[in-house]
Image (tube, helix red, strand yellow):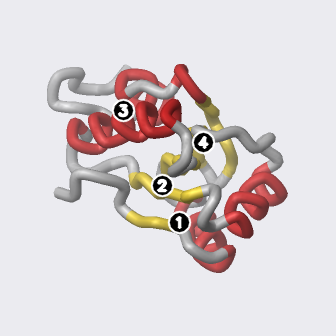
Amino acid sequence: MSAGPDLQLRDPSDLDALLERAARETVVLFKHSTACPISAHAYGELVRFVRARANGAPLVALVRVIEERAVSRAIEQRLGVRHESPQAIVLRGGVPAATLSHGEITADALREASGGATPSSGTGR
């Protein structure tokens, strides 16, 4: 298994494909600023979450907000979620089910918000 996100969104068309997938499965969309130490810490928590997932679910996608500004803007417009960075948006049924930002982003909070089971928790709830 990868030690990081499952995929990276580089173009608004990547977001379209992800939202189609999010209609069928839970997705964690992580917005990351490569210039921010708070975001670097949150990214470390995201990696902990990814490593602990059972069966690789939920899917985790990354957007670097500085490098992929068009994607970051498209997320705000299409999902109606005010931009923050770092930010984790949990999508269920194609719509935002939970959002976490800054210090709220921990491996445990991501697991709880996404319903993602880990070996230690069994059900994630």
Q: Contact, CB < 8 Å: mark 4 with mark 2?
A: no
Q: Is residue 83 above or below residue 25?
A: above
Label 2 SS: loop
Residue type marked 1: Arg
Q: Residue at x 63, y 67 (%)?
A: 68
Q: Residue at x 61, y 51 (%)?
A: 93
Label 3 SS: helix
Label 3 – label 4 distance at C-alpha: 14 Å
Label 4 – label 2 distance at C-alpha: 14 Å
Which is more foreground, mark 4 or mark 2?
4
Which is more foreground, mark 4 or mark 1?
4
Residue annotated with mark 4: 89
Residue annotated with mark 1: 21
Please tell me how crowded label 4 is: few (under 14), some (14-19), or many (20+) other residues with Cα within 10 Å. Answer: many
Labels 4 and 2: the sequence-earlier one: 2
Q: Is residue 6 above or below residue 28?
A: below
Label 3 – label 1 distance at C-alpha: 24 Å
Please tell me how crowded label 1 is: few (under 14), some (14-19), or many (20+) other residues with Cα within 10 Å. Answer: some
Label 4 – label 1 distance at C-alpha: 14 Å
What label does residue 25 carry, if any?
A: 2
Whole-percent x and y of residue 117?
29, 33
Residue type marked 4: Ile
Label 4 SS: strand
Label 1 SS: helix
Residue annotated with mark 3: 45
Q: Contact, CB < 8 Å: mark 3 with mark 1?
A: no
Of 88 and 66, nearer the camera is 66
Which is more foreground, mark 3 or mark 4?
3
Please tell me how crowded label 3 is: few (under 14), some (14-19), or many (20+) other residues with Cα within 10 Å. Answer: some
Q: Is residue 19 left or right of residue 78?
A: left
